[in-house]
Image (tube, rainbow, N blue to C red):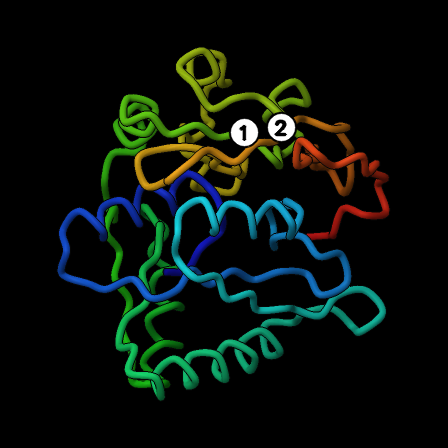
Amino acid sequence: MSWSGGKDSAIALDELLKVGDYEVVSLMTTVSEEYRRISHHGVRETLLEKQAQAIGIPLEKVYLPSGESGGCTNDVYEEIMSRVMNSYKARGVQTVGFGDLFLEDLRAWREANLAKAGMRGVFPIWKRDTTKVAHDLIRLGYKAYLSCVEGKVGSGFAGRLFDEEFLRALPLGIDPCGENGEFHSFVFDGPIFNKPVSLRLGEIVLRDGRYYADLLPNESVEKCTAELIPPI
């Protein structure tokens, strides 16, 4: 399962597990090698590990270069993922699950890269109405915080709980699942969890036009600075 730690990944995984046609052997997440945070979402690696433990599926972290190493260009990314996919294929894995909803070009790009390794993608929630998906997530009992929010959405949304009140407050034109990249989330509880992930909200940081909520394990006393939030 291509795993971002967010709500769409969670409900897509939920669907795969319910259908029972696939054995989910791994949660695969890309992590900034320099910052040790989930790519795009800005969530600490330590929380990602706790999340996978709470779900009970092995986690495989794929580290991506950034900063002084020259950054992760598309060519570098595809080279890294090609090695990862070939490794999975050698272990007998045939498919990769994704939580994509409607971005046709992104799906086509994923499928083209998987085809190079002789694999294919599975898209359990593809083309579902995003408003329905958002409400279904809440109805099913999934709980998530917004970890990264585009400036156009508003600073007040970073760190908010993904709930009905949040959906009512979203500005017009913002997809309720953030499928266009308007916001990213971190799921800490729900039907696929054996136990919730205990966490708390740290500082809100503005970087490159995005607001990041620094989510912390409850036992952590770490502080966040803007320099610790990776660029997208």
Between 221 and 81, which is closer to the camera in this rendering? Answer: 221
Q: Secondary structure at mark 1?
A: strand
Q: Is residue 190 above or below residue 82?
A: above
Marks counted in the figure total 2
Residue 210 placement (x, y as % from top left): 69, 37
Give the residue furthest to the bottom. Answer: 90
Considering the image in quadrants, where does the N terminus appear? bottom left
To which quarter of the image does residue 105 belong?
bottom left
Q: CA distance from mark 2 to mark 1?
A: 18 Å
Between 113 and 90, which is closer to the camera in this rendering? Answer: 90
Q: What residue is shown with label 2?
A: 152
Residue 163 placement (x, y as % from top left): 43, 18
Residues at circles 2 and 1 in contact by the CB criterion of under 8 Å: no
Q: Residue at x 67, y 31 (%)?
A: 218
Q: Amino acid at mark 1?
A: Tyr
User: Would residue 167 be found to the left or right of residue 42 on screen?
Assistant: left
Q: Residue at x 49, y 12 (%)?
A: 169
Between 134 and 145, which is closer to the camera in this rendering? Answer: 145
Labelled disc at residue 100: none
User: Would residue 202 be found to the left or right of residue 99 on screen?
Assistant: right
**Mark 2 crowdedness (10 Å alpha carbons): few <14, some 14-19, many ≥20:** few
- The label nearer to you, 2 versus 1, is 1
Q: What residue is shown with label 1?
A: 145
Q: Secondary structure at mark 2?
A: loop
In primary-sequence order, the first of circles 2 and 1 is 1
Q: Residue at x 45, y 25 (%)?
A: 173
User: Would residue 66 be found to the left or right of residue 110 on screen?
Assistant: right
Q: Amino acid at mark 2?
A: Lys
